[in-house]
Image (tube, rainbow, N blue to C red):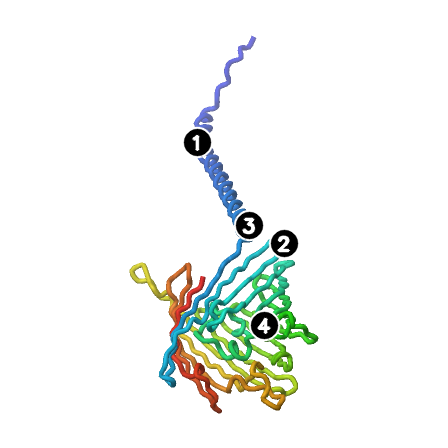
Amino acid sequence: MRRRGNRKAKPGSTPRTVALMLILMPLCAGQARAQDTEERLSQVEMKLEQQQRRWEHLPRIHGILRGKYEYSPDLDASRFEVRNARLSAEGKLPLRSEYKLEVDLCDESSIKMKDAWVRVTPWKTLRLTIGQQRMPFSIDAHRNPSAQYFANRSFIAKQVGDMRDVGFQAGYDLSSVGNRTMLRIDGGIFNGSNLDNQKTAWFTSPGYSARVQYFPLDGVALVPSVQHQQIAERTASYTSVDFGAYYEKAGWHVETEFLHKFYGKGAFDDCNAVNVMAIFRRSLKKKNGARFIQSIAGLSRYDYMQDHSSGKGGFVEGTRHLARTDAERHRMTLGITCAVSNPYFPTELRFNYEKYWYPHGGALKNEQDKLVCELMIRF
């Protein structure tokens, strides 16, 4: 019989096998480590998402404090003022709902409720809001004090276009292919009595307001809006039409706005108002690893308004003509804003000089040439 012996291995096969094992071992180990890393990252992400979901329904507290000093050359007098001391609480609730409460503890020395509304969002692009809120109108008049550029508001924002009321508002956003908002539409109906006693604010003709924000390019916005409101205890009314636009890029913010206000039944002459401003902000380089001023901005603004009536003064005695509350005026404002390096509580130091012109007189004491120094902090 033929003896069966052990088959001899081919020459060189064993070294090749060992070499292959040596090569594959680090790769397998590396793959295992990569899988472990991915699993750990996935676990961390899951924990963060769970934590965010738990925190999502906690109220977010915000605030703004504005203290300022003013000097009037015409009066040769000075004054200190706390212009705003606002606190707000806002947040999200389950089932796609939101809320906001905002109160100003020192709005020109008075305590005033600013916002108190609830909102539902059936989907991300649709907003349905009811409560006390700012009416959707204008660019500058719709800004919160924390977003203002100057120490004092423009005539459009303060006298002619500023309006809050209680009512219902709907908003819708339309996004482009790149998920950039192209169009934002807001409109609503309101009591039409500003913030008077809500129990007696029964209406047959509501106030209304609507605003469209169109963003054709990144940093460019076109904003037309309209507003109708009852004034003088519902014995008069007005309608305002506003068109504004701004450009914001590379440290620049350039904005212009025109408002036309006309009164029902000829209760007062039509009022036109203009606001044009330009701001350039530049970041400062660090020196020795630290800096107190993070950025500095130069500001300029021209605004104008014709004779205006808010309706708060009622009618001229024996007539159906509203009393004038604001005289025609021009104003030029120049300023510098220094942003303090504070990542937790954004702080700004503002220096403004305002020059007024009254073509037909009627200047009030607090509406004349003035130097304004303001310190603003928000959180």
- Whichever of labels 3 and 1 marks the residue nearer the N terminus, that label is 1
Residue lying at the far top of the rendered structure: 1
In the structure shown, which secondary structural element does the residue marked by tag 3 occupy?
Answer: helix
Label 1 or label 4, whichever comes before in sequence order: 1
Q: Are marks 1 and 2 in contact (CB under 8 Å)?
A: no
Query: Helix, strand or loop at disc 1?
Result: helix
Q: Nearer the viewer, residue 22 or 214?
A: 214
Query: Dot 2: few (<14), some (14–19), or many (≥20) neighbours within 10 Å?
Result: few
Residue type indicated by callout 4:
Leu
Residue 157 rendering spot, x and y as whole percentages: 52, 76
- Front disc: 3 or 1: 3
Nearer the observer: mark 2 or 4; the answer is 4
Can you say whether 10 is above or below 40 in the image?
A: above
Contact between marks 2 and 4 (CB within 8 A): the answer is no
CA distance for labels 2 and 4: 30 Å
Alpha carbon distance from label 1 to label 4 = 81 Å
Q: Which residue is mark 4?
A: 195
Q: Residues within 10 Å of mark 1 (few under 14, many from 20)?
A: few
Identify the residue under disc 2: 95
Disc 3 from disc 1: Cα separation:
47 Å
Report the disc number at residue 53.
3
Q: Which callout, 1 or 4, points to the residue nearer the camera?
A: 4
* Residue at point 38%, 77% (across, down): 79
Q: Which residue is mark 1?
A: 22
Residue 117 appears in which quarter of the rendering? bottom right
